[in-house]
Amino acid sequence: MDRFRFIKKPPIGGTEFRTSRIPGFYRLSVEQRLAFLARSFNLDDEQVSQLRNGNALRMKHAVNMVENAVGVFGLPLGLGLNFLVDGREYLVPMAIEEASIIAAASKAALIIRKGGGFRTRINDPVMIGQVQVLDLKKPQKAVEQIKNYKEEIIAQANLANPRMVQRGGGVFDIETRVLDGGEDVGEMLVVHLLFNVCEAMGANAVNYACEAVGSLIEKVTGGRVNLRILSNLADKRIARAEFTLPFEHLTTKEFTGEEVAHRLVEADRLAHVDPYRATTHNKGIFNGLCAAALALGQDWRAIEAGGHAYAARDGRYRGLTTYKISSGCLHGEIELPLQTGSVGGAVKAHPGVQILRAISGVENARQLAGLLSAVGLGQNFAALLALSTVGIQKGHMALHARSVAVSVGVPPNAVEEVTQEMIRRGEVKVTVAEDIYRRLQKRPKQVEEEDELPVETFAPGKIVLFGEHATVYNYPGIAAAINIGVKLKVTRDPDGPRFLHPHFKKVFSVPKSDQDIQLFSNAVDVALGIYDLRNEPIAIQIESELVPGMGLGSSAAFSTALCSALRQYKHLKRSKRWDSDFFDEVQSLEAIFHGHPSGMDAATILSEGVLWFRKGPPREFLPIQVPTPISGVICLVEPGARTIELVKKVANFREQKPKYVNGILEDIGNLTVDAGIALGTGDTYEIGKLMFRNHELLAKLGVSTPALDRAVELLLDNGAIGAKITGSGGGGAVIGLVEPGSQFDLMESLSHDFPMVLPFTLGALR
Ligand code: MEV
């Protein structure tokens, strides 16, 4: 695997991160997620291992952080996705033990980004330091004195924090309040130092300043100073986040979008008028906000304390959010004090926080406050949405059940069934998920009962997405089954067995087509031998939508359709999609066409999906689950050369210029690894970019032609996201990836430039 290192050199976060929208992230294995992060943020092996094992914080750090240290404490760490805040994309690291929080935040952010995401307004980072003055005969007089000596007090306070002053911060104003401490304490003066703490959370700096002015304040007021400490009711440092969402994005199965919006407003209103509800409402906000604050090294207790106090600012404890309806939209907002820091504290002392900060994309304390307020609002929106529609238990349970199913290794195609069964039983547990999955595996597979003739089968064609030619040298390749293929029919024929004249789609006059047809006929003969059907009264007829010689896998599709039909005829059922006997049978027919086929075509066609392949040994066939359908077009350009000739051409070139050619092959190998991840995460733009890069490398290998290069350019000029040769080159076809929804327009506009243009969709066949 050394050849395919994802990891580039530090600094972390050096690569520009494009989007927080990563469809199917939850379906990736943890290792795939980490590989994605490593690739996107230049993490080295050590950093990846620290994230995976939660051991970024070692004992040596812990002993410098707290007293009596005996260890470090772990919590699950996940990524909140889809956050678009003030037009910037953020991934939100969240450390939390409660299931569903991260999924709910990500879901909320996904819905909210449909309305343009979150917008925030963040006040300057002004903290309040308090100095308590007692034993005053005339508190109002003391107030006057503080006003008179304001400049001196400010100067004295700032002497304690010269570096902060240099950075443009420090104490800049003073406020006073006179409070009644009751009979035993009497009236007291509280002096507030207003302190711009710049990028810091500010606790230390503010506390220094308060302590520094104590004796001066005693002197000017004639009183006695007791407490000198910051206030966590940081109400000068308010963060506001809001979003606007047209009703259409709120529609559920049961309710119209407008109804959902109204129900949400009603739910929010209860938190405004009832402290019992407000407490739970705000707890939900801090579920997400504090999980992110913790992962990003913030003092989440300060944030939470400030938030709760602010919630009671008018004398009654209320929810921190407000939802309204206007002009066909739901408008949600949150307002709370946020004391965030991008320097000092755990931000500096905890090495894991540094990695997570880089992953988040947050650059300063203001952005951090914006992001945290958005997370809090999003978390609340998710909770209210569930509570005011299906109820939280159902939503929670489904999310929780899904994560339990995934955690016990249930494969993606069975997760839904296992999840639903757990919910039906009302038991969401690891042991129950394991049990359900075990039973599912034992369930007899449905097999097609096809006793009667005619037998009809279909096998799809394939395209090579990445890695052609490099696969010969044991680098990986990625291929995908396509929607068009070969139809085969076995009918009764007293003069049989016979292979009826095949119907291929012909778009070019292929000089050696008679020779090709002879190969198909030979393959039929071998297949009849394999299944012991040499004396059967049957006729075999094919109709192929695949033009032979275009690299679309017509021989493998034919071999698969044939073996499948003859098995059905013999009542030899395939019990599962992947059956190695069946694969071997198909391969032995493929050998008639290709000598020593690698197996990539047959495996891709059998998998009916997107397949990662490596020749080996050991041979690697790994299905890639593409999370959302990705569309493209196949353009047939010119008659293709024989694969064997092109493979030879590359081998000769490699003999002449080993260093140059090996370098290209290695580049193709590395790029294919990246492409595997991009496909697994549904990153269409990355896939497109890598496709074009792959084409350039194939051209350098000498397997492109002027017509193929022109075709790739034409596709890109017409808006394709990426394009390349597919297959061995020397002629044949090119493929292009298209913007969602534009596949058929592009086919239309290219229809005059190529003899044939076909659609394909990845991730949709199975
Ligand atoms: C559970 O941790 C949080 C919720 O109760 C919040 C709320 O009720 O708004 C779902």
Image (cartoon, grey):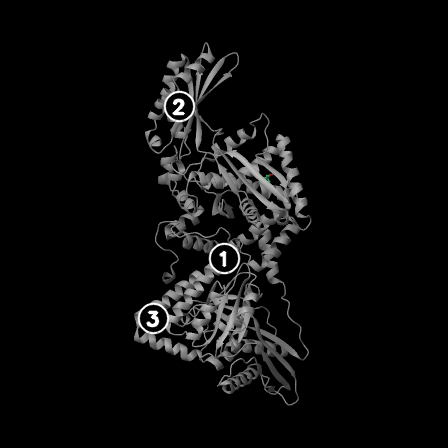
> Which residue, given by chain and number where applicable, does mark 3 sit on?
661
Residues marked 3 and 2 touching at CB (< 8 Å): no
Q: Secondary structure at mark 2?
A: helix
Circle 2: residue type = Cys
Circle 3: residue type = Val
Q: Secondary structure at mark 3?
A: helix
Residue ID at (46%, 10%):
138
State how far apart marks 3 and 1 are (Cα).
30 Å
**Residue 185 in sight:** no
Q: Position of 36 compared to 216: left or right?
A: right
x and y, in percent, of residue 593 in the image = 48, 81
Indicate the quadrant where residue 411 lies: bottom right
> Which residue, given by chain and number where applicable, does mark 2 sit on?
210
Residue ID at (57%, 66%):
744
Q: On residue 681, which mark appears?
A: 1
Q: Residues within 10 Å of mark 1 (few under 14, many from 20)?
A: many
Front residue of 757 and 396: 757
> First in sequence: mark 3 or mark 2?
2
x and y, in percent, of residue 534 in the image = 59, 86
